[in-house]
Image (cartoon, helix red, strand yellow):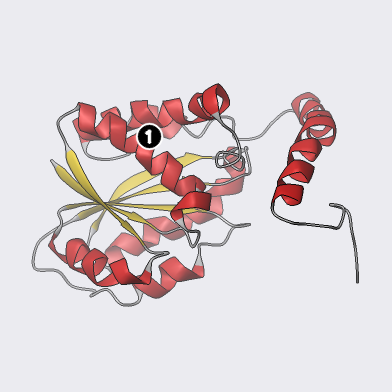
Amino acid sequence: MHVTIINGSPRVKQYSNTDKIIASFGKGLAETGATYDLYTLSSRKEWDAAREAFISSENIIIALPLYVESAPSLLLEFLETLPTQREKPANISFILQSGFAEGCQLRCGEQFLKSLPEQLGCSFGGCLLHGDNFGIRILEGKQRERILKPYIAMGRSFGKHGNFLTPEAKKFVGPEKFSWFVRAIIKTVFWFSSKKIFEKTVKEWGGTQPLDYQPY
């Protein structure tokens, strides 16, 4: 099986969490003997090749981040350039990731993606949903590996089944909603730990104002 993977993130590879996820997913996919080509929409130079691959491929995966219930405008612009009819049948599956950890935060995005394949003359191969991915590009070593390792397993699963309609793919999203106790713990950890990580990142990127700075 050969798969065309399109990275719909507007971020360049260096800062793209989606790119890191695709790389891990691709490792698992390759372990099954499947092959894939990756096209990154943040590079406009790849659009023509990505369009041609989309038109000719039978197995397509579009990976994208969800920004507060919104799909990246860059991806939507690219989709508008695609034909709505095909000579060959194709199956489109999606990898939808976000910083929000609860599954309920991804459901609106999932419903939107379910409607896309039919509009593009394709069949729907399911959505692989998972949140809590905000810090992938910031984390290093074992911390990053811990977050990305499950995507390797899902790559193997896709290589075997060719879609994300399996029970294991549906469970991949994790908890639909955290309990009040877990939410309280997360809030505390965020305040004392994540805040320091963000402050360090802002400083490395040349920021001079505190995180809670409100100029307006």
Residue kind at label 1, given as amino acid type = Ser
Residue 82: x %, y % from top left: 27, 73
Instruction: Give the residue displayed 56% in from the left and 40% down from the top.
Output: 131
- The residue to which callout 1 is attached is 24
Residue 181 appears in the figure: yes
The image shows residue 179, relative to residue 210, as above or below, that is: above
Q: Quadrant of the C terminus?
A: bottom right
Report helix, strand or loop for mark 1.
helix
Quadrant of residue 64 in the image? bottom left
Quadrant of residue 154 in the image? top left
- Is 165 placed left or right of 185 in the picture? left
Residue 69: x %, y % from top left: 59, 58
The image shows residue 214, relative to residue 170, as above or below, that is: below
Instruction: Give the residue displayed 51% in from the left and 55% down from the top.
Output: 109
- Is 121 placed left or right of 11 in the picture? left
Quadrant of residue 161 in the image? top left
Instruction: Give the residue displayed 75% in from the left and 26% down from the top.
Output: 182
Q: Nearer the viewer, residue 197 or 126?
A: 197
Residue 167 appears in the figure: no
Residue 134: x %, y % from top left: 61, 43
Q: Quadrant of the N terminus?
A: top left
